[in-house]
Amino acid sequence: MNVFVTGHRGYIGVHLVELLKAAGHQVTGCDVGLFDGTEWDPCVRPDREISKDVRKLTLQELEGHDCVMHLAAISNDPMGELNADITYSVNRDASIQIAKLSKQAGVPRYLFSGSCSVYGAGQKMDLEEDDPLAPLTAYAKSKIETEEAVSKLADDDFSPAYLRNATAYGYSPMLRVDLVVNNLLGSALSYGEIRIMSDGTPWRPLIHCRDIARAFVAFAEAPRDAIHNRAVNIGGNRENFQVKDVADNVQRLIPDAKISYTGEVGADPRNYRVKFDLLNKTLPDFKLQYDLASGMDELHRAMVDHKFGKADFESDQFIRLRTLRKRMNLLES
């Protein structure tokens, strides 16, 4: 299979390239390089690389591929709020345009990297795909608006699917510490203090970044009828946690670290617990490789091996928002 991956140099994308190549697929990657130079470990490269803003992709560059996996995005809520216009341009408008170009190019399958953040302030617990959506940020709104627009393109020859990923965490060669699990673990290693910026009560569905990449591979290889034009929550029913539960897991690994509630963000309105029954029904052979405990164990070992500390935690290298602020001109041009 010839696979086109956008955002292949990202936190999840580097895992995806490695998995696709290990499975024998040919991989073309496209990435604008916003976070070049922030690598933690060496990354597996695709067979062909295009260094380009995804908003400028052409029909010819997509021709000859069997699947487009679209991961490139302004990749979380705080980054999305930095400039809402750019967020909509990259996350929504480009995603829709790439889907249209993929269809014109004869690409039969288009996999979109969505988010469980579309549930926002959930109206109930254990949210399913057909429950009301309550996106609270430009990032979340861009994801659901893309789903709505791309679904209209679906037909007998063009099969999109939308992976609503749980909140990512865990080890990646392109490490991030601006994600809740990674952040709390990094804080403990850096300061001996697990700093929770909310009151610790919001629920989050969590998933290891490599398991998200594995889900993309599984969707690419799945029977068409199983996934055609479907939005599917990606995660595990047992992997819903409150932020305070994550802090307890950090303390399990670093017993001397103290838990502190800084309260600087107040009550977090993003509060959602998610059900993943449809994923289990749609792809019954797909199972998560990580639970929160094993994923945190792996990341903790890697951070200790790398001698991760205060200088790393406070640097720009692992905080995407800080790097993005410095490189906004690449997106505004």
Image: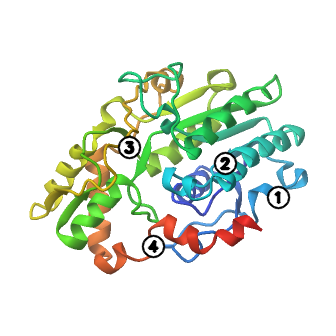
| Residue that badge 1 annotates | 56
Specify the quadrant that holds the N terminus.
top right
**Which is nearer the N-term, disc 3 or disc 2?**
2
3 or 2: mark nearer the eye: 2
Above or below, 75 against 117 in this view is below
**Which is nearer the N-term, disc 3 or disc 4?**
4
| Residue 40: numbered disc | 4
Is 40 on the left or on the right of 294, as rendered? right
Q: Secondary structure at mark 3?
A: loop
Q: Position of residue 331 (x, y in %)?
A: 70, 65
Q: Residue at x 37, y 35 (%)?
A: 271
Q: Identity of the amino acid at label 4?
A: Trp
Residue 307 visible here: no
| Mark 3 vs mark 1, CA separation in Å | 36 Å
| Residue 91: numbered disc | 2
Q: Position of residue 147 (x, y in %)?
A: 67, 32
Q: Residue at x 30, y 75 (%)?
A: 308
**The one of 270 and 252 positioned closer to us in this rendering:** 270
Specify the quadrant of the image occupied by residue 264.
bottom left
Q: Secondary structure at mark 2?
A: helix
Residue sitting at the far bottom = 311
Q: Residue at x 47, y 25 (%)?
A: 284
| Mark 3 vs mark 4, CA separation in Å | 22 Å
| Mark 1 vs mark 4, CA separation in Å | 28 Å
Is 209 on the left or on the right of 293, as rendered? right
Residue 287 visible here: yes
Q: Residue at x 56, y 77 (%)?
A: 37
